[in-house]
Image (tube, rainbow, N blue to C red):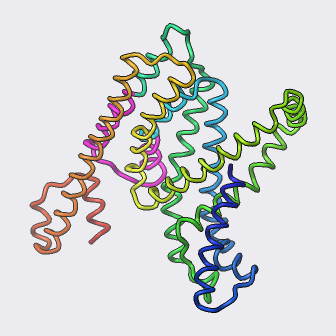
Amino acid sequence: QFVISSFLSGLVIFLRQRGKTLSKEKIISQVTLVHDYLLMPKQVLLQSAGPLSLCWTLGFVLFNASASMMSPAVVNLVRCAEPLATAAIGMAFMGKQYSNRVLMTLIPICGGVILAASASANNKNGVILNTGGVFLACLSNISFSFRPFLMQRLKNTCNTDTTSRPSTKTSFDDMQVFFNIAVIASVVLPLIVWIVEGSSIPMALSQLIKRGELGSFVLDLIGSAVCFFLYQFTQLQIMSSMSPLAFSILTPVVKAAMIVICSFYFGDAFGIMSAIGVLTTTGGGYLFSTVHKAESSRSSLSKTTLGVGGGRRQQELPMHASQSVNLKHHL
């Protein structure tokens, strides 16, 4: 998936830059193209793009491992708790502060996940929850929750890095960022797979060939990789334009349809309680967006009033702690 994503994103960048160059009647050598338009500076790769790619890759490895132990529908249900992990990471490691109103909106989001998962675990087809699978899915949430924070750091690094390439551009668009993330994963992940599962790869290939399923496996893999590229690049574009917590809220909303589709496709029971859980999670996402918008508007109004009214007005405005921190930084 990451290799094909590297190829597709690199192809898009090459065709885009080649078209611009031909229109200007210039010729770009392959070395110049790779140096200036594809690969980021070494310092940016090590400090920002590398950690982002590793978290992204680890999240998918853990997700796939969890899906091998229990139904993908249930894995997606557990993944809906990503907003809770994002809030915890933001407060514990990134110095973020969220108001109580915003944090309260996470209750229906996570509560809906628990309700739907519990209903699925007690369906008539038997228990489909697995302790190891749930644990791996939770670790996947943690890995994915680091992505938007690291994405913000990557953007800040690219915008402030003026020493690595003084004669070339230091800012990269979303396609170029995704290319670098996919390239790093394409290099690191095969090494890890070979160390952990290298001995079982020849046996797995021989079984596919023996059953005559190697061709269908390759086609499924290519189709999955193309969908992976389209979906993950779209996620990266959204991630780069939203706050980490707001982005994490999209996960349960997007997963709602996927949960229903996976339940029907894989034959899992999806009863009324499961539907209520999914609707509760989706409603919590809408509630968060409403509260978050109100908080942002209130914070912007407070900043504007402070800028006009001066220090005396600053004492008259009752503000939440998180807004106070933002205002101190702004002032």
- Provide the residue span drawn in magenta: 85-112
Residue at image x 70%, y 59%?
A: 184
| x and y, in percent, of residue 17 in the image | 61, 78
Between residue 148 and residue 309, name the one nearer to us. Answer: 148
Residue 33 in picture, x, y percent from top left? 69, 79
Residue found at x 43% / y 34%: 257
**Vertically, is 211 above or below 301?**
above
Please determine whether, in this image, residue 191 is positioned above or below residue 136. Answer: below
Whether residue 95 appears in magenta in the rendering, the answer is: yes
Residue positioned 39% across, 44% down in the render: 249
Which quarter of the figure has residue 12? Answer: bottom right
**Residue 198 among magenta residues:** no
Residue 297 on image: x %, y %: 20, 58
Task: State the residue at coordinates (62%, 30%).
Answer: 67
Q: Is residue 145 left or right of residue 192?
A: left
- Number of disc labels: 0
